[in-house]
Amino acid sequence: MNSRPIPCFLLVLVSLTSARAEGFTFESLCERARVLAAKPHRPSPLRLDDFWKSLSYDQHRDIRFQMDKGLWAEDGLPFSIDFFHPGWTAKEMVDIHEVVGGESRPLEFDRSLFDYGKNKIPADVPSPPGYAGWRARCHLNSPDYMDEFLVFLGASYFRAIPKDSPYGLSARGLSINSGLPGVPEEFPVFTRFDLKRPAKDDTSLTAWALL
């Protein structure tokens, strides 16, 4: 009987981010977080062109990631990764890296991964400088189809789904001052993800996140 990957993942939350290709360990990630946490917060330097910001719900919905072009999709691995295109309400972008053999390399935005549907993109509009988030897939319910089971998109929101179940509510990596009278709520954001390339026999996906 063929075994199927179990949609488990390890998510490590630390604080803030700086994106640069380099050697990667959990300890180096924690040190990066400590250094950044000691400094005043700086907004992400990634800026989205007004054209993408002004997309309507229907225009943004018509931009679809081509699943067969996902990260690891052509490598015969138990997991693959889709990326979300910025636009409409998804105006913030995150740094996404792939970790292979202890090295973390940034994944640059690639417009060819998307089908833009009926959208007409002016020639002078620059591509977004990053992705809005990511989605993980595996053979969760069928050996013939890669189902999505994990999504990170927007602020610190994420959601996961088990076998043969519908999605429920999204969760947050961190909430501050939620529901407190007279105190403004804070919305921390994920700013960087490092995704470990799985081996062919892996049954879990590992992702590290800076928050």
Image (cartoon, helix red, strand yellow):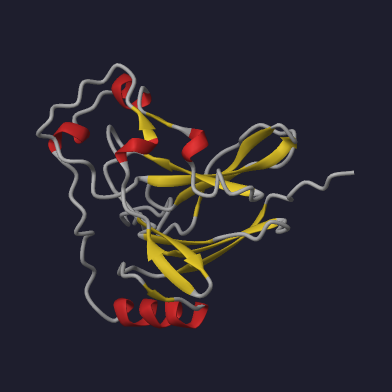
- Residue 62 vs 131, above or below: the answer is above
Residue under the point 29% across and 16% down: 118
Locate the C terminus by quadrant.
bottom left
Q: Residue at x 35, y 59 (%)?
A: 191
Q: Is residue 153 visible?
A: no
Q: Nearer the viewer, residue 34 or 181?
A: 34
Quarter location, residue 73? top right
Percent position (x, y) of residue 38?
Answer: 29, 81
Viewed as shown, does residue 191 lie left or right of 149?
left
Where, quadrant-wise, is the N terminus in this rendering? top right
User: Residue at coordinates 26% horizontally, 23% vertically from top-left?
Assistant: 56
The extreme right residue here reads 1
Q: Can residue 92 be seen by looking at this rendering?
A: yes
Closest to the observer: 168 or 5?
A: 5
User: Residue 160 placed where, x, y %?
Assistant: 60, 45
Q: Position of residue 195 (x, y in %)?
A: 50, 60
124 above or below 78? above
State the image quarter where residue 121 is shown: top left
Q: How many numbered callouts?
A: 0
Foreground residue among 133 and 117: 117
